[in-house]
Image (cartoon, rainbow, N blue to C red):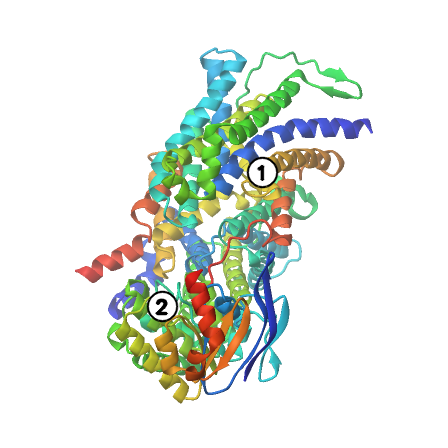
Amino acid sequence: MLAVRDVAVRFGGVAALDGVSFEVRPGTITSVIGPNGAGKTTAFNTITGYLRPTRGEVTYDGARLTGLRPSAIARRGIVRTFQRTSVFPALSVADNVRVGLHLSGTAGLLEVLLGRRRLRDEETRLARQADEIVEFVGLRHRRAEIASELPYGEQRLVGLGVALAAGPRVLLLDEPGAGMSAPEKGVVSGLIRRIRDQGATVLLVEHDMRMVMGISDTVIVLNGGRVIAEGAPAAIQAHPDVIRAYLGSASA
Amino acid sequence: MEQLLQHLVNGLVLGGTYALLGIGLTLIFGLMNVVNFAHGEFYTLGAYAAFAALGLAGLDFTLALLGAIAAGALGGALCEVSLLRPLRHESIDTTMLVMIGLWIAMQNGELLVWGGVAKSISHPFPTAPLVLGPVSLAPLRLFVLLVAAALIAASYLLIQRTKLGRAMRATFQDAETSALMGVPIERIHTATFAFGSALAAAAGALLGPIFLAYPSMGDLASLKAFSVVILGGLGNVPGATLGGLLLGVAEELGAGYVSSGYRDAVGFLIIIVVLVLRPAGIFARAERIG
Amino acid sequence: MRRSGRAVAALLALTLPFWLANPYVLHVVIMAGIFGVLALSLNLLLGYTGQLSLGHAAFFGIGAYTSALLTLRLEWSFWVALPAAATAAGLAGWCIGRLALKLRGAYFVLVTISFAGVVSLVSINWMDLTNGPLGLPGVPPPELGPWSLRTKRAYYYLVLAAVAASCLACKRLVGSRIGRAFVALRENESLAESIGVDVTHYLVLAAVVSAGLAGMAGSLYAHYTRFVSPEVFLFTYTVTMVIMVVAGGKGTLAGPLVGAGLFTALPEALRAVTSWQWQMLAYGVLLVLLVFFLPRGIVPALTAVRRRS
């Protein structure tokens, strides 16, 4: 279980996060929402190791994540996606995903240089796994195309494939619906549900309310760097503090 | 003690010209984000321009100096317009490669035009050194120090007090807004590069008579300029001034007290030590996460 | 290349000294081979991890000096000196990798240039070790049993083996998980980190292997020319290497080799016609033109043409 405990992040004099605590129950889809500037992206970057908190800690199954490099956090099974720059631009879709399978491979320098047979079998396995993931995100017809030449929505799907390739136990999605059309959001929502059904935990940051309320098991609301509400979608939609936070920011 | 003062004075003379090199590069590298490996070649250009003006055109020393500065400015403007402007939206690595190409082409061009034998640049000053208390200083070196100081002051004034300087600062702080406000961005870029190259040429014309002029003199000049910029902080003109003076003094002290063979290593070591110890410090380019 | 093409090429390569017996031409081919290894080494760093090192001459020189000193002063066999040279250079690469770890782009370039500058100054000034500007003459040729590999023909086969081994190593590296990690770092470092690529580890690895290969090339050079001086640290060598990789096609396997062949043969062909200053001037102009018109290099351009037809 992913736990965030009293995390605070200051940029200069501004507290982007001011003592945030929540837990992400395993096997659920949890969404983090809030008005602009509420601290969602900061929380996201802190959990995944791209930012260091000024106070507090993040743990997974009791083990400390704060202070670790993002690659070490990924090795513990916590993988994130990116909103912009979500792919390896010059590589094909299939190669993108194959890079994502990095943690699944075991080849070391000496073995590679000596060209051991075992490696050839591993490479075949990895290629097959990559194809399965490309199929899963629905991009089989694009597998040989260069990622940077794809439309934005499909690039996000490639990014999702790359993250899945890393075998996450907790998958963090950075605004998976941003910049997508309604049908594309539907596809992504379906994928997210299937990922949850396969046993992974999903934490996402998102602005699209409909998408959030449609797929989430739990919704966490941030405002001004603090958690102001937490619960099932229906409860959150009716929560007076939440409504006030959004109305407040809308009129501001 | 006297030796120390002598070294300090010599170091300041050298440092003044390093400051000119550094100010020029800090504007180009720090503000324009161009990795100008050809900076030293404008230094060489200045030296050879002074040589040509003095030896071939028979101009007097001050005019030759001005001619060298003009040559640097013109050359810089030409390079910016033909090579950098078309590539302005490419990555920093691409412009770096182009500047490396320019470096090689300019240096070997100079080699072909002037030959590999070092040229001595004549100057009108008497050779007998002035004795000012415990230190002795050749009149030429005093001239160099004074002119360098004047140019540094002039640069500072240009950037802080003139319309051009304001436009430069505006462009490099926020290009989009400046463009919207009517600042001619393209011309500012050309002007900045020309200005930086002119300063390098001035340094070359000043140091040329003290040492000799030879085609590869720019290599070390480039690297020393980079170490000054790294010391003083990118885009930081007072920093580059201080850094240049420090480098000059450090070199003189190193040559005097440690070993003259390793004199040029000071600049290299500064680069390595500063970049290694303060890697994120002054040059953190915000990483776009997500 | 298709299999039959490859077989023919291999046959030609193996029998070359017999149908191309002119010693001058053989010399050019040997130098092209040594530079080929150098270009491959630089390509690993520049083409695959995307970091430009302008100090590769330092690794080349360290390899040359190490090999020369071990065989001259300690009378070690060439066959031990070569790996020792590669290891020494690899160690230097490790230092650069670890030191310059947090730096990217231009700053990494500056550190590599500075490093090369310091090493060069040391080789000139540390007379006791390196004999300074006078250099180390009389570096012994390799011995294989009763034979001394001092003829061009014999040395050709040595260099051929080295080139083949380097190609094989690079090919295996690039096609492996390690190679993919390199490319990931070049293409999108944040993304690479998010899927578990340890940036530190892989950049240092790339630096070590790259430097080691360059060191091996240095050793081959030392025992061929049988003379090592601080001139091995000349920036000219670094520039030539960069042109070879950039012109040939960085990030490809054939590119550096094509570049090495082209830019070793070309100067020799032009030597009769023009001086080396013109040649270097042309290199500078060429680099600029390449960036503008053929940014990916010759091999990718040819591949694209072939694919279209």
Of marks 1 and 2, the one in the foreground: 2
* Relative image position of residue C205 (x, y in whole percent): 53, 65
Q: CA distance from mark 1 to mark 2?
A: 48 Å
Number of residues whose C-alpha sits closer than 10 Å to that of mark 2, classed few (under 14), some (14–19) or many (20 or more): some
Q: Chain of mark 1?
A: B
Question: Which chain does the numbered disc 2 sit on?
Answer: A
Q: C259 above or below C157?
A: above
Q: Image height check: is B204 above or below C46?
A: above
Q: Is residue A118 visible?
A: yes
What residue is shown at x 54% (from left), y 79% (from top)?
A76
The C terminus of chain B - image quarter: bottom left
Image quadrant where residue B192 sits: top left
- Image location (x, y in percent) of residue B94: 39, 48
Identify the disc placed on residue A178: 2
Q: Please identify the quarter of the rendering in which residue B80 is found.
A: top left
- The residue under label 1 is B224
Secondary structure under badge 2?
Answer: loop
Q: Amino acid at mark 2?
A: Ala
Which is more toward the observer, C11 or A38? Answer: A38
Q: Nearer the viewer, residue C270 or C181?
A: C181
Looking at the rendered structure, the kind of residue marked 1 is: Lys
User: Left or right: where does residue C238 sit relative to residue C1?
Assistant: right
